[in-house]
Image: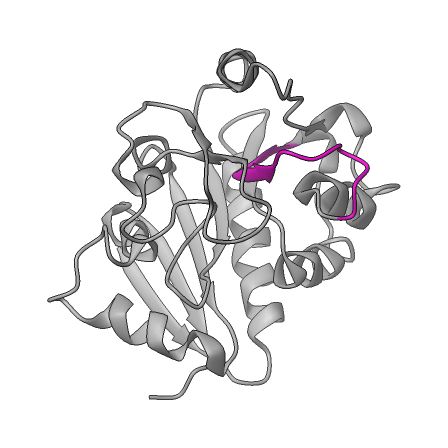
Amino acid sequence: MLKIIYDKYKIYYRTSEIIQKSINNFILKKDKVIIGLPGGRSISKILDILKTKPLDWEKIHIFMVDERIVPLEDPDSNFNLIKTSLTGTIPERNLHPFYHQKEDIEHSLKVYKKEIEKFGGSYDIVLLSSGEDGHIGSLFPNHPSVYNDSDFFISVENSPKAPSRRMSISKKFLLKSKIGVLMFIGDSKRGAYIDFLDNSVNYDSCPSKIVKKLSDSFILTDIDL
């Protein structure tokens, strides 16, 4: 079921509440909860709130939705942002970075696929934030990344946003997620949000619309149309 929530002033808190409730519901049924995260300031703010919530972090495992092909300690690394936000909260072994070899990204993708398969092979919850152009993760509109039919993670070359080399969740892998949480935050995302709501715009032109195909998804925005 698609649920659209408008909240101009408490959007980060509303998002964190949805994630907290979803995590606790999964923990009632299973001993591990797998969460997919991208980078970005909005994600960092959500994590800062979640750190204050009563959650069983021993049972939470975090994998990347996308990553820049830079060293993990680089300020541009999505994993670096997540690790910095959660250090001291989640056991380090529950954070699963994408270790890459610049000369052999395809091998690195296969290794990461095997790593997530140890934990069930899909995300229980995937948290996403739309870009100004409607991209999510590193799936960009009308770009080879969004046309890639791989089952798990993909290599992204010539990204429209720097750095040009990245890895990303594939469209097919995203669709395996049980719950999707997508944010459109800030007026710069207005065009993307309008495209998201427009039934005449296809998924290739607005990748954020892929989230609509999940059986359970939450769309949160502070954009008043």
The extreme bottom residue here reads 225
Given residues 136 and 124, the one toward you in this image is 136
User: Left or right: 174 with respect to 2?
Assistant: right
Q: Position of residue 121 (x, y in %)?
A: 44, 20
Q: How many tags in the picture?
A: 0
Vertical placement of residue 102 versus 107, above or below: below
The residue under the point 52% across, 53% down is 161
The extreme right residue here reads 88
Vertical placement of residue 114 versus 91, above or below: above
Highlighted range, magenta: 61-75
Q: Position of residue 19 (x, y in %)?
A: 55, 53
User: Left or right: 89 with respect to 130?
Assistant: right
**Quarter in which the N terminus is drawn:** bottom left
Quadrant in the picture for residue 93? top right
Viewer can see residue 174: yes
Quadrant in the picture for residue 146? top left
Viewer can see residue 222: no
User: Left or right: 211 with respect to 50?
Assistant: left
Given residues 206 and 166, the one toward you in this image is 166
The residue under the point 23% across, 50% down is 204
Q: Position of residue 192 (x, y in %)?
A: 35, 70
Vertical placement of residue 80 versus 127, above or below: above
Decide whether residue 30 is among the magenta residues: no
